[in-house]
Amino acid sequence: MTTQRESQVQAHRLVAKVAKEIAGELYDELAKVNAFYAKYPDVNSWIKEGWVYYIKSARKILGTMLTTNISYEQKDIISEALIDDQWLQPTRQHIVQINTGD
């Protein structure tokens, strides 16, 4: 079952994967707050809902990876994911619809 917030957010699979990894890495620190832990008693419950908060960070991390010493194949995968991810954004889709006259 997807949450309302998750159903409103679109991200490329690679961007979403990195965002979920970030959420998972931060869980232990966030769970030190009692109110947070009461709502998200385990890491999976947090990742399922909280990953959407880290999409921008995931995009930045992937973009930074393009400037590092990784293979051209990896850079191609990341570049394609970031480009595709931009097309998933609602404002981008809206601009395309306006420009095509449809």
Image (spheres, rainbow, N blue to C red):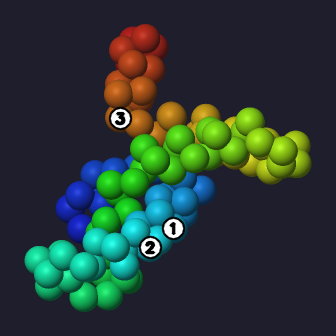
State the SS at label 1.
helix
- Left/right of residue 75 with respect to residue 47 in the rendered view: right
- Reading the image, the residue beneath label 2 is 24
- Amino acid under disc 3: Pro
Q: Quadrant of the N terminus?
A: bottom left
- Percent of width and height locating residue 3: 24, 68
Marker disc for residue 88: none
State the SS at label 2.
helix
- Percent of width and height locating residue 2: 29, 70
Residue 6 vs 27, above or below: the answer is above
Marker disc for residue 90: 3
Q: Are marks 1 and 3 in contact (CB under 8 Å)?
A: no
The residue at 40%/54% (across/down) is: 54
Is the residue marked by circle 1 packed among few (<14), some (14-19), or many (20+) residues within 10 Å? some
State the SS at label 3.
helix
* Front residue of this view, candidates 52 and 23: 23
Q: Are marks 3 and 2 in contact (CB under 8 Å)?
A: no
